[in-house]
Amino acid sequence: MSNTYPIHKGYADTNYGQVHFRSTGSPSAPALVLLHQTASSGAMFEPLMRLLSDEFFIIAPDTPGFGGSFAPPPGFSVKFLADCLHAALTNIGVESCFVFGHHTGAALGVQLSHDHPGFVRRLALSGPPLLSPEQVAGLKAALRVPALDPDGAHLAQIWERIRKRDESLPLEVVQREVLLTQQARLYAPDAYQAVFDQPFGEQLAGLDIPVLVMAGEHDTLRASLEPAFALLKNGQMQVLAGQGPYVCDQAPQALATVLHDFLR
């Protein structure tokens, strides 16, 4: 694994709006699509993209409402987001691909695989959001985006929340996630609700493609791992020792190795 290719940025036109994406690697290589968590963007995958760019043509789109992509309508669903991403990917020439999704990205990966048979060849899910009612209630309280405060206290609240999720996270990454969360504050609550409303377990159980479910040992969605694995027809499971919810930033080399072994 080497850093052979630069990361490019671009926009894909769709009937819904423009989807911003990052890409790297040779377009002749197998396509690998990376789907981010809420309320981040494709920026969270840049270390991983550099490690895998000599093996795959990697596309990391910003989900509508996040990063540089268009603003979705109120009350959007995971299905709407997946349809937008499918349109964007096909419009830049992706006919089939591997998919890796983290948290909300895992929900999108399952929806994409469910709605567009044959498009996703293999699916890797980090922190699959197979949620109990109790988990949903806890996440609704923990993930609330604070209202704007004239003294800027809302930014401090977001900073504190992200730091508490992983206190070892580099401050540059904390700042990136704080700014992306604030930028997406109008859309993050609907994105969370869309995941809560998705029939994730039913869709996951219906997939025939190879699926890898994984989670960091200290991931906030670690408890969903075994129940998600139990639903799979053609599945593998892996726990990433010592890792938390920011594994893409904190351990990109370990994650690249896992994806290399599963996808190749």
Image (tube, rainbow, N blue to C red):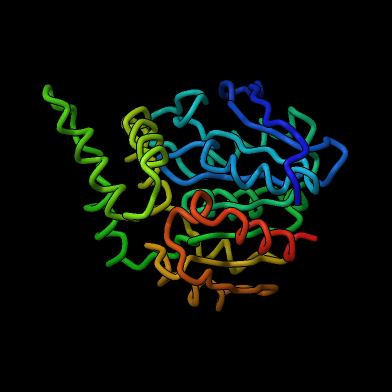
> Would residue 200 be found to the left or right of residue 184 on screen?
right
Q: Can residue 163 be spotted in the picture?
A: yes
Residue at the (83%, 35%) spot, across then down: 27
Front in this rendered view, residue 264 or 159: 159
Q: Quadrant of residue 262?
A: bottom right
Front in this rendered view, residue 20 or 90: 20
Establish if 69 lies above or below 33.
above
> Would residue 186 be found to the left or right of residue 202 on screen?
left
Front in this rendered view, residue 72 or 173: 173
Residue at the (24%, 52%) spot, across then down: 142
Q: Quadrant of residue 136?
A: bottom left
Establish if 41 lies above or below 117.
above
Q: Residue 115 in the image: x percent, y percent?
A: 64, 49
Q: Residue 253 in the image: x percent, y percent?
A: 62, 56
> Would residue 74 be found to the left or right of residue 53 on screen?
left
Front in this rendered view, residue 251 or 144: 251
